[in-house]
Image: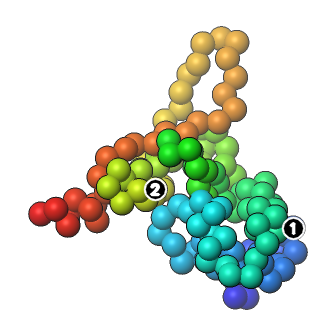
Amino acid sequence: MEKIVQLLESKGIRPTAMRLMTYKRLAELEVAISLGDLEKDFKISERSTLYRTMKTFEENAIVHQIEDGTGVLKYALCEENCECEVGNDLHLHFHCSNCDETVCLTEHKIPQINLPEGYITEDINLVVKGVCEKCSRQSE
C-alpha cells in the first residue's frame, strides 16, 4: 500500500482511503472496468466519490478511458511513466465479443497518424473486436 501512496503523492494526489482502494482494485484487474462495475466492488461507496476519484486519476495520467463500442466507458491503469499523449503512449485495446471484456494491448502502440492540414488530433482510440485468447482456448 505504501507504493500506491508514494505514486499518488508523486502525482500531487492526496491518498484518501477511496483513492487507495480504487487504485488497488484497478491494479488487481487484467481488464478494463466500467464505473458501474467498479462501484459494485465497493459496497459502501458513493458513486459521486468514485466518479471524482476516477476523474482525478484520469487528469493525472493514472488511468485512461476506453470507448470500446459498447456504449459504456471503461477505465484501465496507465503504464508507468505514461502521460497519455497522442503519438506517444497510445496503444491498442481489444474487446471480446464473447466474454465482453476489454483489455489493453500495451505492447501494440498506435502508429503516428498524419492528418490533412487543418485537422487537429485530440484523441485516438483504436479498438480491435473479436474473440480473446481466453475464450478462443475454451472453444477448442
Q: Name the residue at the top extreme.
A: 117
Q: Residue at x 69, y 32 (%)?
A: 122
Q: Residue at x 84, y 80 (%)?
A: 16
- The C terminus, quarter of image: bottom left
> Picture coordinates of residue 27 (x, y %)?
58, 74
Query: Looking at this view, is 38 or 132 the one in front?
Result: 38
* Amino acid type assigned to the residue bearing label 1 in the image: Gly
Q: Which residue is mark 1?
A: 12
Direction from residue 52 to residue 33 in the image, left or right = left
Q: Which residue is mark 2?
A: 102
Q: Residue at x 65, y 62 (%)?
A: 35
- The N terminus, quarter of image: bottom right
Q: Name the residue at the bottom extreme.
A: 2
Which corner quadrant of the image does residue 121 belong to?
top right
**Above or below — where is 18 with respect to 1?**
above
For label 1, count other residues whose C-alpha is less than 10 Å away and answer few (under 14), some (14-19) or many (20+): few
For label 2, count other residues whose C-alpha is less than 10 Å away and answer few (under 14), some (14-19) or many (20+): many
User: At numbered mark 1, what does the secondary structure look like: helix, strand or loop?
Assistant: loop
**Above or below — where is 32 with respect to 39?**
above
Which corner quadrant of the image does residue 64 belong to?
bottom right
Residue 137, visible in the rendered structure:
yes
* Amino acid type assigned to the residue bearing label 2 in the image: Thr
**Above or below — where is 25 with respect to 112?**
below
User: At numbered mark 2, what does the secondary structure look like: helix, strand or loop?
Assistant: strand
Between tags 2 and 1, which lies in front? 2
Distance CA(mark 2)–CA(mark 1): 29 Å
